[in-house]
Image (spheres, grey):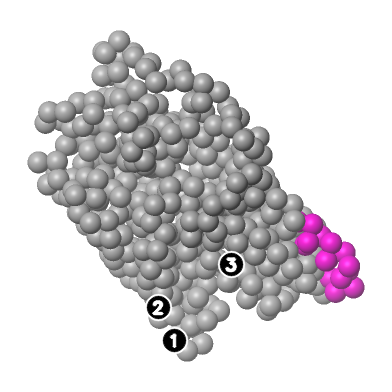
Amino acid sequence: MREVTSLAAVIVVAAATLGVGVFGLRVSRTTSDFFVASRRVGPFLNASAIGGEYLSAASFLGVAGVVLLRGVDMLWYPIGWTAGYLLLLVFVAAPLRRSGAYTLPDFAEFRVESQAARQVASWLVCLIGALYLVPQFEGAGLTLSAVTGAPTWVGAVLVAFVVLANVVAGGMRSITLVQAFQYWIKLCALLVPALILWVVWHHDGSPTRNLHSSDWVEPLQGPHATYLTYSLILATFLGTMGLPHVVVRFYTNPDGRSARRTTLAVLAMLSLFYLLPTAYGAFGRIYASDLVASGRTDSVVLELPDRVFGGSGAPLLTALLGAGAFAAFLSTSSGLVVSISGVLSQDVLSRRFGSVTGFRIGGVLAAGGALLLAAGTRGLPVAHAVELAFAVAASTFCPLLLLGIWWRGLTARGAIVGMVGGGILSGAAVLAVMVGAHAGGWPGALLAQPALATVPVAFALMVGVSLADRARIPLHVGRAMVRLHLPEAVDVDRGTYEPIA
């Protein structure tokens, strides 16, 4: 009964996703539709779409799992992933939209006037996108296996197929509708069972067993805990603005004001959502603490209904949660594939195949490559896998965006050396973790949480090399800075101002 119900729910979500994508295909006709939805997405729709793609496997399953495992220390995951949008709102959202770029490599070329900087940014988009796609596919396999008993590879392949069908068909215009739809699916899928769990918990006398152990309720316990915590905070706070699939969303707003309003709406939506996985982690500590010993903490959201309810109601709630989890994998994977496809199309494939065909081929390459990578890295906790992608983003694109937007002294060489240096250092740590390397003491802490070391190095390299290379400040830097910081109504090229109607 449980397996059939859960499989039916997953199929319904996949079919609904394809249906919404088909509708999007009907209105996707131009290259601009494929890359940035013709820059006509309003704040509420765009915020829902950002919530859809940002709330990934790590948010839906991983947060509850790490809270179950380690308690209050892990609350920095949802706090950091939400607060990152506050920094993005204050420093990046509106100027980035005003730049007129389609992708992060576009911004790099626009700001430092360098094809080499564009190429480095392109490779980094593919790297970060692949690192973020891997836990989505792993989470899909875990979910389908937990609710139906299917082999883990089936879930990954199913997600890849549905994502490619939507991305190849309609590009950004189609994916925007799909992701907005999936945010509300995910929210409802977690909210309804959580409310029922709370009612049952209250009826049981509000038990608090297993919630009082010191290692779960006292923060900063264990070796190097202070460093690990602050490195996690830095990665999540600064990594958000460097995620390609997040940043590309701000190119779809009509103007900078809409970009700011979108970010405010995202902050509200994420704050509401992240209350729920945290609650599941606490309920898991009460009703399913044995998952810690068995190493299956990532499945706590899916296993709680059987543990708490039993009977005929549990399969329905498990099916609802499974459907929400699949919506998480589909929406985030869609955004990642779109961001990678856009870069591959513009910088590699468009000259031979054209923009739209190159975009579609790029999607196939992105999904296929991530599937192969996921097959070789099974067993890495979902939340930690996503956090590693944040560390790379914080060590590469975050310095480029902050310095590029707010410091006119950034040069092409500074940008390239900073991105390459930060990327190599953080990428080496990520690779070591993914292949299962282990180290004790400070080397182990640096590998597990590299951001607190690699982010300052990346900033220092960009600033230091740019200061040494100040004779090569981009020729049109003044015009670029005016474009980034003045309202869209100002025509930078003509020097005129026309009020927006």
Q: Residue 335, image x and y in percent?
A: 44, 59
* Residue 355 left/right relative to 396: left
Q: Residue at x 21, y 41 (%)?
A: 319
Q: Residue 411, image x and y in percent?
A: 80, 69
**Local SS, label 1:** helix
Whether residue 436 is visible, yes or no, is: yes
* Residue 471 left/right relative to 12: right
Residue 361 tag number: 2
**Local SS, label 2:** helix
Q: Which residue type does callout 2 highlight?
A: Ile
* Furthest residue toward bottom: 352
Query: Which numbered disc, 1 or 2, marks the residue that appears first in the sequence?
Result: 1
Contact, mark 1 vs mark 2 (Cβ under 8 Å): yes
- Mark 1–mark 2 Cα distance, whole angstroms, equals 9 Å
Bounds of the magenta segment: 459-473
Query: Which numbered disc, 3 or 1, marks the residue that appears first in the sequence?
Result: 3
Query: Which residue was labeled with disc 1?
Result: 353
Of tags 3 and 1, which is closer to the observer? 3
Label 2 neighbour load within 10 Å: few <14, some 14-19, many 20+? some
Q: Which residue type does callout 3 highlight?
A: Leu
- Mark 3–mark 1 Cα distance, whole angstroms, equals 23 Å
Position above or below: 278 against 470: above
**Local SS, label 3:** helix
Query: Which residue was labeled with disc 3?
Result: 124
Query: Which numbered disc, 3 or 2, marks the residue that appears first in the sequence?
Result: 3
The quadrant the C terminus occupies is bottom right
Q: Which residue type does callout 1 highlight?
A: Phe
